[in-house]
Amino acid sequence: MAAKLLTGKEVAAKMDQDIQKEVQELKAKGTNPALRIIIVGDAPDSVFYANSAKKMAEKNGIACEIEQLAGTMSQNDFVALLKQRNADRNIHGIIVMRPFPKQISEDVVKHILAPEKDVDCFNPVNAGKIMAGDLTGFPPATPQAVMEMLKFYEVPMSGKEAVVIGRSMVVGKPMAMLLLQENATVTVCHSRTKDLPGVCRRADIVVAAIGKAKMITPDYIKAGATVMDVGINPEGDKFVGDVNTDAAKETAGAITPVPGGVGTVTTRVLLKHVVKAAKLQNP
Ligand code: NDP
């Protein structure tokens, strides 16, 4: 039997509803939730991403300004500007687009962004909060989007075997912590894992965050397992996931498509975080 397709559209629509309701409540109390997206330079990917996030924020009633700075700006000037934005009480969430021009070090800047405004988990304080199970933090958008989808589709996690393939700071590691928080038994795999298909076949939930087009075939999937495909890999003029969806859907019980799956939900997570930040800053 073919797997159920876990599409992102329905999850995003429900999140929009919830966000809009909370935005209205905040506005009624005198707080106008606001997001600031800062770009140093003019990298087309950053500009495109910022514009689409702004559109979605405004659709949900969240004010969003894109601040585009000269690509030649010095690190000291950038740090000074970021501190001003941290102190601005009318800004609740801040996203700084990466990569930076070479004169600006990520390792310096990530400590400057105020953790309470860091809606996309750039500051290591927020990574630490995931480890500690501290719910005042902001997990990165992508693993949080996977959690939103698992919860929306009522996929059982407690006591289940989950395998995360990938151990990056933006996806794999926080993903593992978020699943652990839901009481899954979590295994994290990577490029040196022995017998990856065998390890994956133990899983009730597989999260693929590898960056290798269509690598996960039915050989990696236990019959009936839920497969969450985080991958976004260019293939010709399209994008494909890390899972060979056409083949895997014959074995899996449920599977996310690419496009139209996890990626559809990530920007909503950022907006949900802006609302959460605005609430925490205005108790
Ligand atoms: P990274 O390149 O930072 O990490 C990839 C991970 O996969 C590494 O831990 C690596 O292991 C592991 N890996 C690579 N090859 C293999 C292999 N053959 N077998 C087992 N493990 C392997 O990627 P990201 O975490 O940033 O992104 C992962 C994917 O998710 C990409 O396709 C990316 O485009 C996509 N992505 C999607 C987002 C979304 O919104 N849907 C957002 C962010 C990313 P090792 O550590 O040993 O090198």
Image (cartoon, rainbow, N blue to C red):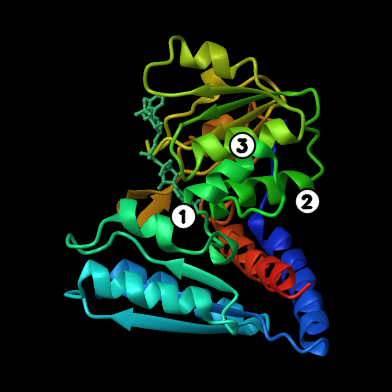
Q: Is residue 43 above or below residue 218?
A: below
Could one spot residue 270 in this view of the protein? yes
**Residue 24 placed where, x, y %?**
79, 84
Residue drawn at x 43%, y 10% as measured from the top left:
194
Q: Earlier in the sequence, mark 2 or mark 3?
A: 3
Residue drawn at x 52%, y 35% as measured from the top left:
173
Q: Which mark is residue 70?
A: none
Q: Quadrant of the C terminus?
A: bottom right
Among the 4 quarters of the image, the one containing residue 60: bottom right
Which quadrant does ligand 1 occupy? top left
Q: Amino acid at mark 1?
A: Phe
For label 2, the SS is helix
Q: Is residue 143 above or below residue 197?
A: below
For discs 2 and 3, the disc positioned in front in the rendered view: 3
Seen in the image, is 152 located left or right of residue 171?
right
For discs 2 and 1, the disc positioned in front in the rendered view: 1
**Residue 110 placed where, x, y %?**
40, 56
